[in-house]
Amino acid sequence: MSTVTERLEALGLTLPKAAAPVANYVPFVRSGNLVVISGQICFGADGKIASAHIGKLGAEVSVEDGIAAARLCALNVLAQVQAAVGDLERGVVQCIRLGGFINAVPTFAGLAGIMNGASDLMVEILGDRGRHARSTVGVAELPLDAAVEVEAMFEVK
């Protein structure tokens, strides 16, 4: 079995620095063996949102770019978990839940497929520990006009 670090390397990914909050909240809260991660938007490694990830699915943002944005959100979620527990390999027992918010036009019917970007990456990186319950909703607007935002809950050691 490969480690989280080996899986990230195999995917050509690096965990970004955990993003600072953009409003009046904390990035995560730990209570006992649970860590709740505040919504993470699709910041890239440079700490910015790519122009392809700004706007609405079904309008300015393509399905492919929406999936890529969801994957970035998942990476940012994992960066927050690492900040909370110090080590993803030893600290994470299970991803319990992901919640996805998709900035979309009212007629966009592909919300679940976009959120699969985050769900799939969680499993690719954490293996069976990345399998989770999930909710996905379409929204009229997200912070910084991001295409996708993902929140999470983890069981940790």
Image: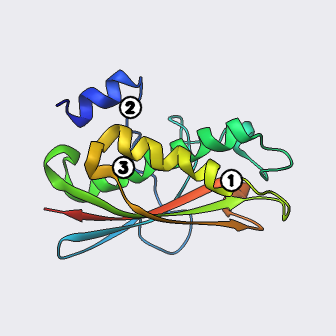
The residue to which callout 2 is attached is 14
Instruction: Please tell me whether mark 3 sits on a helix, a strand or a loop.
Output: helix
**How crowded is the residue under tag 1: few (<14 C-alpha within 10 Å), some, or many (20+)?**
many
Measured from the top left, where is residue 51 in percent x and y?
A: 74, 38
Q: Earlier in the sequence, mark 1 or mark 3?
A: 3
Measured from the top left, where is residue 47 in percent x and y?
A: 54, 42
Q: Is residue 26 left or right of residue 130?
A: right
Instruction: Please tell me whether mark 2 sits on a helix, a strand or a loop.
Output: loop
Measured from the top left, where is residue 108 in percent x and y?
A: 80, 57
| Amino acid type for the residue under numbered disc 3 | Leu
Please count the marks in the image.
Answer: 3
**How crowded is the residue under tag 2: few (<14 C-alpha within 10 Å), some, or many (20+)?**
few
100 in relation to 52, above or below:
below
Q: Residue at x 25, y 71 (%)?
A: 34
The residue to which callout 3 is attached is 78
**Res 10 → quadrant:** top left
| Screen quadrant of the N terminus | top left
The residue to which callout 1 is attached is 146
